[in-house]
Amino acid sequence: MIALDQENKIFTLHTKHTTYQMKADHNRVLLHTYYGSRVGGGDLSRLIQYADRGFSPNPSEAEGDRTYSLDTLPQEYSSCGVGDFRLPSIEFEPVDGSRLADLRYIGYELKKGKYSLPGLPAFFGGDEWETLIIHLIDSTCKMSVRLYYGVLESCDLITRAVQVVNEGGQRVQLRRCASLCLDFQQGDMDLITFDGCHAMERGLHRAPLRPGVQSVESVRGTSSHHHNPFVILCEHDASEDYGLCCGAMLVYSGNFLAAAERTQLENNRLLLGVNPYHFCYTLGPGESFTAPEAALVCSPSGFGQMSRQFHRAIREKLVRDPCQGRRRPVLINNWEATEFDFDAEKLVNIAKAAAPLGIELFVMDDGWFGHRDTDRSGLGDWSVNKKKLPGGLEALVPRVKELGMSFGIWIEPEMVSEDSALYRAHPDWALGAPGRPFTRGRSQLVLDFSRREVRDHIYESIRGVLNSADITYVKWDMNRSLTDVWSAALPAGRQGELFHRFVLGVYDILERMRRDFPHILIEGCCGGGGRFDAGMLYYTPQIWCSDNTDAIDRLRIQYGTSFCYPVSTMGAHVSAVPNAQTGRITPIETRGVVAMAGTFGYEMDLNHTTPEEKEIIKRQTAFFKEHYDLIQRGDYYRLSDPFTDPFTAWQQVSADRGEALVSMVSGSTHATAPFRRLRLKGLDPGAVYRVNGGECWPGDVLMAAGWPMPMPTGDYQSIQLYLKAE
Ligand code: GLA
């Protein structure tokens, strides 16, 4: 609910558990007055303290009042170069070369429903949303700044976006435009970030903020394996079920900057948006720039509640799922089984072994097109390799369908190999600066997706493939970071727009694909989880979580991912052992339990499994299908921390608390194991639950005292408990 006090220019955004407030003061400076547990409202600007601080200057209107400084007041969207020395939200340069931005309030709009952002992904929905638009202006430069707020009360979600319009008569260069600025007035806080590398993504890192700026960012053109555009600021003692925490995510898939600053006043500013690195957007008179959407969930009661609210909002108001509430298929992908070495017979044999085990979708991975026998050639030539697949997709797809399975295909549209017909015809379509040698990644180059003709060509050739057979799933891959970021189609003064224009180009093709093939389920991928972000989730309902399929490493990767993103978005497969990435051997039961904490599928040649393993796989797919709603849409609870605890456990609970699924995986075993109990969460304390069809346990006992865990009798064992209220 958005409450307005027009006279005092106070804007209060209430969600189910939180309140957010801002106020335009007597100088029309937009102050941020509060964000935290839900409170009644009123004028919370009285929380703000005014005091003279040396070297914190005063704006002209302060008329000798040294206690009034932009440097000490909590700002809703910070200015630049006019007295606030903390992180600036915006920076622009008119022709006179000044870099000053002094934003003052001029008005607001209130609307039912949710705003949308043309060309950019954003949360969507109808009247369950309210929108507030605050208008600010730098009156000298005539730069108008519109702050958008979307409020989704039930999910405690507040979205933000920013539009900058050049209302002056001369061009202005926009050099920085954050999507979100948030000043917390409370003292000590921790910053949590999710970091890693290829095949080991989104590990949780937590540290108290030190004085100064601490940040994570991507300059790789994608959101990256290395840092995620999702961060948390929280109280020192915040934990899964206790304490104030505030998660902020960016709905964007390119370079980002997430920066937190602990100031001289020992309060904290959080800034999130497109990375100012190599960013310079020229706005002619009347032109505008829209900064991507950011979304906030504040939880007064720990991380678990914050995650569940993000999960619900992402599932229901961000992901556009072609399966529309129906079950997504259990898939098998041939990559780890064959890599590039396959032909039609090999693929059909993998499908043949999978179909009787309850697997429903066969995905043909990399290697089916052009001269793609290694990763050095073929990208860009999106037509079937007739040596491997002599009859083309027209012959292969019906053979898979005859087995009762649907068919999916891998593509990597943003890339080109130098050894390809496309590159030979259009060498200037690859990103690369004149006179400089290429920097290659996985031996490939990146196409200039800022160019319409490049996108049109790639899209048309992919459209031809998708029209040539009954294809119901696409894995959209992207296997390198951007380098040599220079476009033959942009003038020198506009090269600073290229990183962002590239992302807009990716979104453009994804949107076309959704429009033309609304029934196709697209799985995002970027060498696994290198572009696991809310921007991609708007187009691709699931994303391959990591190239690392080792069940034990996956526990950590999926744990970190779960802080923001729901189970239904995390691509996860059972693969062969010894694992291709780690060499580890884990039981097939455990691999199944871990993959079921994601979208669930297989990535191995099931012809090489024993009859016993086949029976286990049959049971796994049947179990997954039976409990699909609970697993994919249930409320998610983390029961342990795989970085510190000797076992990993998590739990899904149905909305009515009538059902729950508990999953546990132990680490390496030791003799004389301690007695352990696992305390469950989110159950109905008054209900009695039957566990795995056997004994009954009261919900309050399971939550207060816990469930006695059996002694592991080997490494990496797993247990699932299905609880049903009597
Ligand atoms: C990336 C993906 C893998 C696989 C290969 C194919 O690494 O993450 O799953 O598709 O590309 O080249």
Image: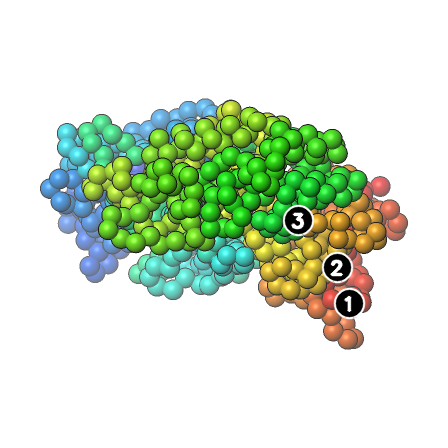
Q: Which mark is residue 714?
A: 1
Q: Position of residue 556 (x, y in %)?
A: 60, 58
- Could you tell me if the residues under marks 2 and 1 are in contact, i.e. CB atoms within 8 Å? yes
Left or right: residue 723 compared with residue 33: right
Q: CA distance from mark 3 to mark 1?
A: 25 Å
Which badge, 3 or 1, is on the more N-terminal residue?
3
Q: Nearer the viewer, residue 601 or 580?
A: 580
Dot 2: what SS? loop
Left or right: residue 687 compared with residue 11: right
Q: Which mark is residue 587?
A: 2
Which badge, 2 or 1, is on the more N-terminal residue?
2
2 vs 3, front mark:
3
Q: Which mark is residue 603?
A: 3
Whether label 3 lies within 8 Å of ligand 1 gets the answer yes
Is 473 above or below relative to 714?
above
Dot 1: what SS? loop
Q: Position of residue 472 (x, y in %)?
A: 61, 31
Q: What residue is shown at x 25% (from left), y 54% (from top)?
A: 85
Asked whether residue 294 is in view, the answer is no
2 vs 1, front mark:
2
Colouring scheme, one of rainbow, by chain, secondary structure, one colour? rainbow
Decide: few, some or many residues near mark 2? Use Cα within 10 Å; few <14, some 14-19, many ≥20. some
Residue at the far right in the pictured view: 694
